[in-house]
Image (cartoon, rainbow, N blue to C red):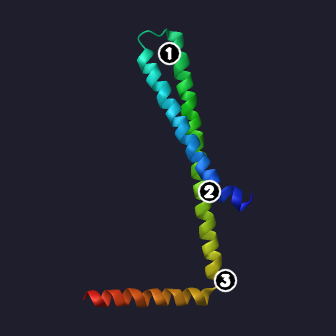
Amino acid sequence: MKNGMIFGHGSVDSSKQALVMDLKDAVGDADRLLTNVVAASADEIALARRKLESRLADARTVLVDASRVVSDRAKYAADATDAYVRDNPWKMLGVAAAAGIVIGGILLRRH
């Protein structure tokens, strides 16, 4: 799998949009079901219920897919950071020392 395909913003954005649409559809179906429940037959209620369950299942699938993408992105970022630190230990030691000096200076000013 290519990084652009897994980690691109398009895949996360399209997953968000699909999830929002699925949830809006499910809410609309639930609203119609509640509005028409008195006049509806048992078959119509059963059909509406199956349709609502299907929409919720679709939304759940999109949500699981989106969480996988986010998890994969986090793992990729952690792996890339680990590799950079291993390849550049002296640079990272310098960055850590500089951060320590800055934090120390801030703490000394407060007291």
For mark 2, what is the residue?
9
- Point out which mark residue 82 bears: none
Q: Which residue is more in the foreground, 110 or 50?
A: 110
Left or right, 87 with reference to 64: right
Asked if disc 1 and disc 3 are in contact, CB closer than 8 Å, the reply is: no
Alpha carbon distance from label 1 to label 2? 40 Å
* Screen quadrant of the N terminus: bottom right
Residue on which the image places disc 3:
87
Instruction: Tell me the residue at 42%/91% (across/down).
Output: 101
Q: Which residue type does callout 2 highlight? A: His
| Residue 110: x %, y % from top left | 27, 86
Marks 3, 2: nearer the viewer: 2
Q: Give the mark nearest the N terminus, 3 or 2.
A: 2
Badge number at residue 45: 1
Counting other residues with Cα less than 10 Å from the Cα at mark 2, is it few (<14), some (14-19), or many (20 or more)? few
From the image, which quarter does the C terminus lie in? Answer: bottom left
Q: Is residue 40 above or below residue 10?
A: above
Q: Find numbered disc 2 in the image and state the secondary structure of the residue it sits on.
A: helix
The amino acid type, in three-letter code, at marker 3 is: Asp
Looking at the image, is mark 1 or mark 3 earlier in the sequence? 1
Which structural element holds mark 1? helix
User: Looking at the picture, which amino acid does disc 1 mark?
Assistant: Ile
Q: CA distance from mark 3 to mark 2?
A: 28 Å
Horizontal relation, residue 36 to residue 108: left or right: right
Left or right: 67 as drawn, with respect to 97:
right
Q: Label 1, label 3: how many angstroms apart (C-alpha)? A: 63 Å
Under circle 3, the secondary element is: helix
